[in-house]
Amino acid sequence: MALPLSNGCTRLTLSPPARFRHRSTIFATLSPSRPDTVNWVEATSSFFDQDTRPIMLFDGVCNLCNGGVRFVRNVDRNRRIRFEALQSESGKKLLRRSGRAPDDISSVVLVEKDRSYIKSEAVLKIMEYLELPFPQLAFFLQFVPLFVRDFMYDNVANNRYAIFGYSDSCEI
């Protein structure tokens, strides 16, 4: 049974089974839930004021991720995508805008002015911005169920340092 007390604590009384005679009392302080006081969409809107191109957030020390960024840069001849490391201050703000923790480097994130994409959805959306044949390939890959695509993505992402290694600093 929980009884609220006047000092902000809650008194929890646990009734023991019949064979025990003593009762246990536990005091716990309940913190009021604090909503995030910063509107991260408004706080990061300046990223899209002068330049409306989407921003690809990537793990700046991951060799696989850096290779992916180099690949996208080479294929994206029209420079339709911008890049930012997840570990940078701008990257952390954009992660918050996307509803993710600022220290979450588990996934590539594509941030557009009105929406963000993560994991396999981000990869497919990035492919849509590239030159032929990548938009067509993304079209066909979207028919693979999301849970299958994300399962495959997570397996690679969780082992990327072991397989591809990492560097001490961001190359890009």
Image (tube, rainbow, N blue to C red):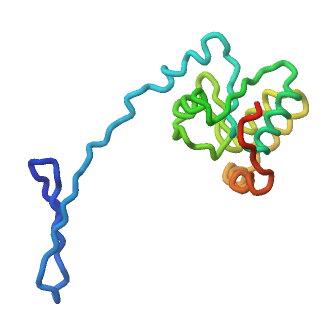
Relative to 171, say whether 29 is above or below: below
Quadrant position of the C terminus in the picture: top right
Name the spot of residue 145 as percent of width and height, x first. 71, 50
User: Position of 7 compared to 134: left or right?
Assistant: left
As drawn, the residue found furthest toward the front would be 168
Name the spot of residue 9 as percent of width and height, x first. 17, 52
As drawn, the residue found furthest toward the bottom would be 19
As drawn, the residue found furthest toward the right would be 133
User: Position of 82 compared to 2: left or right?
Assistant: right
Task: Name the quadrant containing residue 37.
Answer: top left
Relative to 129, say whether 19 is above or below: below
Task: Name the quadrant containing residue 46.
Answer: top right
Task: Name the quadrant containing residue 56.
Answer: top right
User: Position of 32 compared to 70: left or right?
Assistant: left
Q: Residue at coordinates 79% horizontally, 27% vertically from top-left?
A: 129
Residue 123 vs residue 30, the one in the foreground: 30
Q: Residue at coordinates 75% horizontally, 24% vertically from top-left?
A: 81
Residue 105 vs residue 125, the one in the foreground: 105
